[in-house]
Amino acid sequence: MSERVSSCSERKKWVMREERSDKENVISSGTSAVFESECPGINPICAGIINDRCGRDEELIRRFIEKDYSEGRGPLLLKDMEVAVERLERAIKDGETCAIFGDYDVDGVTSVSVLYLYLRSRGLRVGYFIPTRADGYGMSMEAIDSLRASGVSLIITVDTGITANEEIAYARSVGIDTVVTDHHECRPELPPAVAVVNPHRPDDGYPFKELAGVGVAYKLVTAMEMTRASAEGKSPESAAERILSEYCDLIAIGTVADVMPIVDENRMIVAKGIEKLKHNKRKGISALIEASQRGSSAREMAASFISFTLAPRLNAAGRMGNAGTSVELLLAEDDFSAREIAQRLCETNKERQFEENRIVEEAVAKLNSDVSYYDDKIIVLDDDNWKQGVIGIVASRISEREAKPAILITFEGNPTPGIGSPMDIGKGSGRSVKGMNLVSALASCEDILVRYGGHEQAAGLSVMRENLPELRRRLNLFASEQFSGVDLTVTLEADAELKASDITLGLASDINRYLEPCSSGNPLPVFILRDAVVQSVRQFSGGKHTKITVLSEGKRFTAIFYGKSELDVDFDPGDTVDLMFTLNINTYAGETSVQLILSDICYSETVYRRRLADRARVRAILSGARFNASEMILPDREDFVNLYGIINDLIKGGRDSFSDRYIMRIIRSRLSGDRAINYVKYKILLAIFAELDIFKVRQDVCIQDAESSEWCLAEDYVAVEKVFHNRKVNLESSEILGKIRRQCDDGNFFRPAESR
């Protein structure tokens, strides 16, 4: 597998998603016929990506293009579904009062909305209950008592409940039945509910296990409608189609927001949902789109729009207060209330962003202030004042930054603020990295946790303050065993390397047409362009993002690096770079063009090879190697004067240390033509300055790790201190200078002179 570590983004490695031994003939005659039949004229690069993702299987390719995975996905295949349907139908018939118990994230609120709308349409007396994050995740005895006081006799959980064994047993003891619908990992013992519908049950035979919580709720209402249609002598298939058509927008939003893989049945559901969002929006969703785009250009409806625009705003209510606000929006029946709630959610999201940035800064400060975190395999951080609803996002950012799983725990809301008690209960949220099952890690600490649950990559927990040190110790012991010999370098995957001529509107259009919806499990295709030359670099949106113009094979491209400032993208015009990106179609001032959305950028191989060669040349010449005057290595008096002036100006400006790359940029900006100073000459000049004590020079020279890739080349850093002499320093006294003069094969020798 070819790989290279990026220079501008720490610890990132580029790899190709598919390794092929038969690159010359990856599309067989059979699969080629499928493409000709299903999508004639498709861009061959796009076809190759679909071919790879479908394992070069003709039937899978056909289903992928058609987005049809309905066969063999009947909802009654789910374990306990018939029992759940029977119990709900009895509740409708007997006029019971029921409550939908949901979670506070987007998956939870869309699940609540789908089930509430359907059950209400069937005439059931139904309400919903969503705890706040301060209440804690999932069901509680207090919530059950509250529902019982309201006359509730049946609770239906959505996106939660699979680990609420004690709470559901309590509900049963006070006369309340429970139907659980969930998609989280199961414990060995299922809760004592009337029915437990979860594709992750060990005894469940449903063929697709990756449904979101809203996907399971959708299966429940589909099963109810199909059962009713059969009882009335109508077509169950038509009933199922009607349910999907009615609720696919909500199911798509919840599925994408919960980062479920957009494959198989989820691909079909999300594709239909996005079409509904384009043409037949609910009042609340329409208002949220309008409010989120106020003051900015409209974006194309796609899975990415759900991920980055709709989901954060719907999530903000649960993170900062009460998720019921998001349900109100999704259920809104008039434009005025929809607009008012949508605006409120947008404002709440801004508050969330502020809190997120504050907590990130504080979490990073904690890491930097304690060297013991350096060796930890799992980062565990806690604080008394972190907003509980935001720590999950921050955990994700810390995990990405450190290339390790991260768990953040907050004691926000404890009865004695500022006075920590060993018995305080902290609520935590964790995010993991590929290869580490976070739920399994927490299970290894089950005896010291109040509760825990979640997915392989994301989990929640509650823990007493006194158990924090032991939790950190045991999680890291577990991780040490799991990660033994595992490379934790952050890996970025690409689908193909492109030439400039490959980057066309046609390719971008075919990706949108045939590969969307793209998200987890079916990501937007990522490409690599090598040896592009930077034309310009500029920031926009107040420095939050960077626009880079590059030239390759005579074609100019605009590349956007979202979330990266000038400090993150330290490249100059003329630099030769490799780009990793997805394609975007941009329309501006009536013109449509293809745009590159960057995942990463680094110096190209040619730059690295030149840097290696230059460093080797410096070492060789200082060790006595001969060279030719045409190499422009032998310095003259003006070279000393010019570099002395540049370094002196840097010191006057308060900069007494710099990277080689930084000072070479200054040198190039000031000196050109015959007076240019190349890297090798710069290093020789620096060595002579140090020898003659004109500057005290300390160089932190990059020493390549023997086990690393040849491209793991960090910058050399130089620290300088000006030395004041009562006399002029004679450059002719330099042994280095005299030595390298004798090594030069021809050319004009240096004219004797003194430095100032």
Image (cartoon, rainbow, N blue to C red):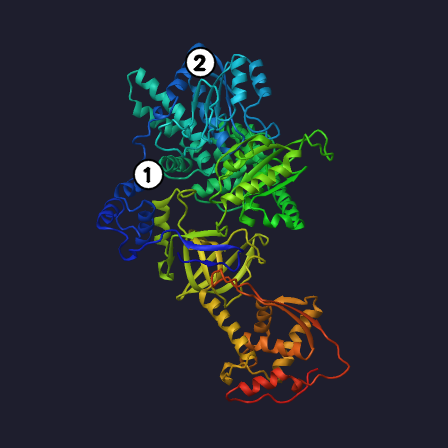
Q: Which of marks 1 and 2 precedes in the sequence? A: 1
Q: Determine which quarter of the picture holds residue 407.
A: top right
Going by the image, does 220 lie left or right of 175?
A: left
Q: Amino acid at mark 2?
A: Ala
Locate residue 734, reporting x and y percent: 65, 84
Vertical comparison of 66 with 637: above or below: above
Residue pointed to by mark 1: 67
Locate residue 518, reporting x and y percent: 40, 43
- Identify the element where label 2 is drawn: helix
Q: Residues within 10 Å of mark 1 (few under 14, many from 20)?
A: many
Locate residue 716, reporting x and y percent: 58, 67
Residue pointed to by mark 2: 91
Q: Determine which quarter of the picture holds residue 467.
A: top right
Picture residue at 58% right of the left edge, 46% below the top: 376
Front position in the image: 272 or 20: 20
Q: Amino acid at mark 1?
A: Lys
- Identify the element where label 1 is drawn: loop
